[in-house]
Amino acid sequence: MTIFETIAVLVTLAAIFSYLNHRFLRLPSTIGLMVIALLMSLGFVILGKLGLVELSHSVTFIRSIDFSETLLHGMLAFLLFAGALHVDLSDLASQKLPVAVLSTIGVIIATFITGVLFWYSMQWLGFEMPFIYALLFGSLISPTDPIAVLGILKSAGAPKSLEIKITGESLFNDGIGVVIFLTILGIIASGHEPDPAHITMFLLEEAIGGIGLGLSLGWIVYRLLRSVDNYQVEVLLTLALAAGGYSLAEAIHVSAPIAIVVAGLVIGNQGRAFAMSEKTREHLDPFWELLDEILNAVLFVLMGLEVLALTLDLNTIAAGLIAIFVVLIARFVSVALPVQLMRFKRPFTEGTIKILTWGGLRGGISIALALSLPPSPYRDLILAVTYIVVVFSVLVQGLTLGKLISSVKSKS
């Protein structure tokens, strides 16, 4: 299929599933789309097993879509920019310590604990896996995804400070998680013992370079926005910033996700306040909200359809179920430890640890990273386990988070 035909199929499915969800299921948009796509995929799998339908064409179509390339080197630029564009920098600054700690130290802790527990679990199940690959799984599953949870937080009336913590953490830990993942993948590819100094330098270059590039590009576009008053041109400039900035960051080997988040924060705050007219703001915000909704719809449909391309058996499903508990334990420790230490300096809302643990949803980035793994004896296992964890995270955690928040609020 051509690129246009692929896009046409995905957008059509997203539109139909959005209608069905709005008309009948009435679930949060992204969760509803994934539920319908997943049910359709499972239905096809069952019918295929019974010999009633031919699955080969559907499987070929799904495998023809490079999910990793589509998300990590395409959609992610616009999704992160749209998310950062609507974050109030003053609110984020008020929670800068928790956001900074959770999105850096928290991700590192979660990666290591997940890797250790996952390695022992796989040994127990009979999967022989080198520890470095278990650590690789830990790095790709540790970043949290804000897309599905933000609407639930708002509708459940989550405390503002808690909403900012989750939003800020998820915007920045994507970049940190990708850097850690690439570092471990580089160690595997080189076959040499890791050099701590080299790894630390690589992490700093990626993170600090991403922040520097994001600030620079954000400032340049801010100056351009100040010099014109034409909403068509200004919207196009922000679109160029997201797409061109992400591509430039990848070309010069700094963290593209961090660069785009920082650039989005600059435009969403400084640019919105001092470089845009009211008319421009009235057009800019709906444009990015609509683009965000469309891309999210396509992304979650893709995630639901991806099950057609997986190879699942009972042992793999068991590994996935165990991995769910492993990831939740690692998330709890990576949240509880920093929060308890930070309590000496600042107060935290009642139930913060519970909500941050359960609200740390995994999403498309984890699947995209798993799909980007080079061929190895462990790739299919890691991919299938990642998919099971993400599905549980989005469907179970996402749908019950609101009740948890309400329960915590009623007790406080």
Image: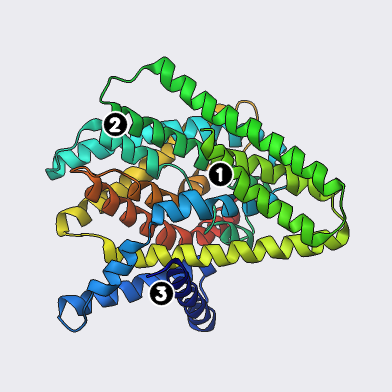
Looking at the rendered structure, the kind of residue marked 2 is Ala
Instruction: Using the rendered view, name the quadrant where residue 347 is placed.
Output: top right
Disc 3 on helix, strand or loop? helix
Q: Earlier in the sequence, mark 2 or mark 3?
A: 3
Which quadrant is home to the N terminus?
Answer: bottom left
Q: CA distance from mark 1 to mark 3?
A: 33 Å
Give the x, y percent position of residue 81: 63, 50
Give the x, y percent position of residue 389: 34, 53
Q: Which residue is mark 3?
A: 36
Q: Residues within 10 Å of mark 1 (few under 14, many from 20)?
A: some
Q: Earlier in the sequence, mark 1 or mark 3?
A: 3
In the image, what residue occupies the spot 40% across and 56% down? 67
Disc 2 on helix, strand or loop? helix
In the image, what residue occupies the spot 47% across and 60% down? 398
Q: Describe residue 217's horizontal placement relative to residue 69 as left or right.
A: right
Disc 1 on helix, strand or loop? helix
Q: Earlier in the sequence, mark 2 or mark 1?
A: 2
